[in-house]
């Protein structure tokens, strides 16, 4: 914090695999910083949870620990956390778009800590997991003020390409697009991927949903960002099939809140691409859910039937880059929600999202995502 803080830190990070104590450890330091316009300095008590575990998780994604710590403990981060008058739970760092801060409740923090050991093993086993990538759990308390608990996740929508639209896809009751004004609109697109990529995604989705089901988690979502691109679909697939592309995930057929709708007009015609600075070939990634080539196909509802059609004004399907991942995985299925599910099922054939048990939600979620990434007639033979 540019010399404006005093830190006391008592933490030894292990280079070995985390032990039981690492998953239950905490470390506290003091930060002195001014976050108001008057320049008044305040003492903040900063607590890191399971720091050795998260350091390993950061290394899995090649996140430098010192860079991460510096980014988190800056004046801008504290100002963002304690100037949040609208009580927004998902915050974008103004100085580092790699990370999203998720403000959580005490009960969600408990769920997360209980899940963390198995989550760590899952991420270590499935390096191409679609689950949100967690990099830290912290609690900050200003002197005389209230605690703020937050986790730090990878920004699924981070890209040097413009994200033209983004979607929130759930198992029940519906999926929707978030437009430029922040309003929700029904999702009216399906995405056709190269078949081997689709198979890998659905296989990994099954592993991830099995984990969430066993952990008793429900009400999660697939956050999906779309960049509209004019580069031919086949050229993008050639990039994905280059030698450096590898799934890196066990049992995955070895036989992606970053730029959001405020980045541009989310309701523009999908047939155009006015982002002349972006390119399919300049941003190659080697993981599922990052810059995946697809063709967007619109559909309209006609008397309860879904009719597939290419978007108006185009001859070819629209070429897009997709960024996606599973978010909101801290909703634990409680006894209260079980009772809610029973009561809802007696009143309607369409239970609420929060009332569906983990197994049922997992099934519906996988079915919904498989329909969004639908089988297609546009596949080509790759070498």
Image (tube, rainbow, N blue to C red):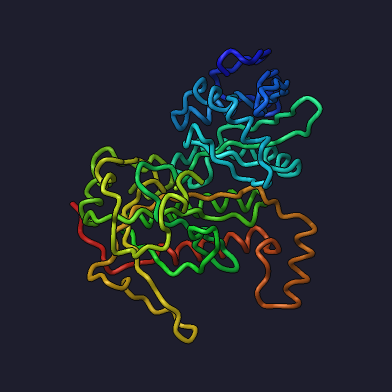
User: Of residues 259 and 84, which is closer to you in this image?
Assistant: 84
Vertical arrangement, residue 349 with respect to residue 228, above or below: below
In the shown orientation, is residue 279 left or right of residue 105? left
| Quarter of the view holding residue 305 | bottom left
User: Which residue appears farthest toward the bottom when viewing the image?
Assistant: 303
| Quarter of the view holding residue 189 | bottom left
Residue at 51% x, 69% y is: 186
User: Of residues 98 and 193, which is closer to you in this image?
Assistant: 98
User: Which residue appears farthest toward the left when viewing the image?
Assistant: 383
Residue 264, image x and y in percent? 41, 53
Residue at 55% x, 39% y is: 153
In the shown orientation, is residue 210 left or right of residue 27? left
Residue 191, image x and y in percent? 37, 63
Vertical arrangement, residue 330 with respect to residue 153, above or below: below
Vertical arrangement, residue 124 with respect to residue 331, above or below: above
User: Of residues 267 and 173, which is closer to you in this image?
Assistant: 267
In the shown orientation, is residue 195 left or right of residue 235? right
Residue 171, image x and y in percent? 57, 63
User: Of residues 70 and 330, which is closer to you in this image?
Assistant: 70
Residue at 63% x, 64% y is: 360
In the shown orientation, is residue 43 left or right of residue 374? right
* Figure quadrant of the N terminus: top right
Residue 127, image x and y in percent? 45, 39
Residue at 43% x, 46% y is: 251
């Amino acid at each position: 914090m540019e010399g404006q803080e005093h830190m006391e830190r008592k933490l030894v990070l292990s280079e070995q695999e985390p032990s039981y104590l690492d998953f239950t450890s905490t470390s506290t330091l003091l930060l002195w910083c001014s976050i108001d316009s008057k320049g008044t300095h305040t003492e903040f008590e900063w607590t890191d949870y399971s720091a050795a575990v998260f350091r390993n998780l950061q290394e899995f994604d090649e996140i430098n620990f010192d860079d991460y710590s510096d980014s988190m403990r800056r004046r801008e981060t504290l100002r963002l956390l304690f100037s949040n008058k609208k009580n927004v739970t998902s915050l974008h760092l103004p100085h580092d778009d790699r990370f999203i801060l998720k403000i959580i409740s005490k009960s969600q923090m408990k769920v997360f800590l209980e899940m963390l050991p198995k989550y760590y093993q899952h991420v270590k086993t499935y390096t191409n997991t679609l689950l949100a990538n967690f990099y830290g759990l912290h609690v900050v308390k200003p002197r005389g003020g209230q605690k703020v608990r937050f986790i730090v996740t990878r920004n699924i929508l981070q890209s040097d390409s413009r994200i033209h639209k983004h979607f929130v896809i759930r198992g029940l009751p519906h999926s929707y697009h978030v437009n430029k004004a922040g309003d929700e609109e029904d999702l009216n697109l399906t995405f056709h991927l190269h078949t081997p990529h689709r198979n890998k995604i659905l296989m990994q989705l099954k592993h991830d949903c099995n984990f969430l089901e066993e952990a008793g988690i429900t009400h999660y979502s697939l956050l999906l960002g779309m960049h509209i691109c004019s580069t031919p679909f086949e050229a993008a697939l050639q990039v994905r099939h280059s030698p450096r592309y590898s799934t890196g995930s066990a049992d995955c057929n070895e036989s992606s809140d970053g730029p959001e709708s405020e980045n541009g007009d989310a309701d523009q015609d999908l047939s155009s691409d006015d982002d002349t600075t972006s390119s399919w070939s300049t941003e190659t990634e080697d993981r599922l859910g990052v810059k995946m080539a697809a063709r967007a196909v619109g559909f309209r509802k006609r008397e309860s039937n879904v009719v597939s059609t290419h978007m108006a004004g185009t001859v070819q399907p629209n070429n897009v880059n997709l960024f996606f991942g599973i978010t909101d995985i801290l909703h634990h299925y409680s006894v209260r929600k079980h009772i809610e599910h029973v009561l809802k099922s007696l009143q309607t054939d369409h239970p609420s999202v929060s009332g569906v048990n983990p197994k049922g939600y997992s099934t519906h979620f996988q079915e919904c995502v498989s329909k969004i990434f639908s089988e297609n007639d546009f596949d080509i033979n790759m070498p």
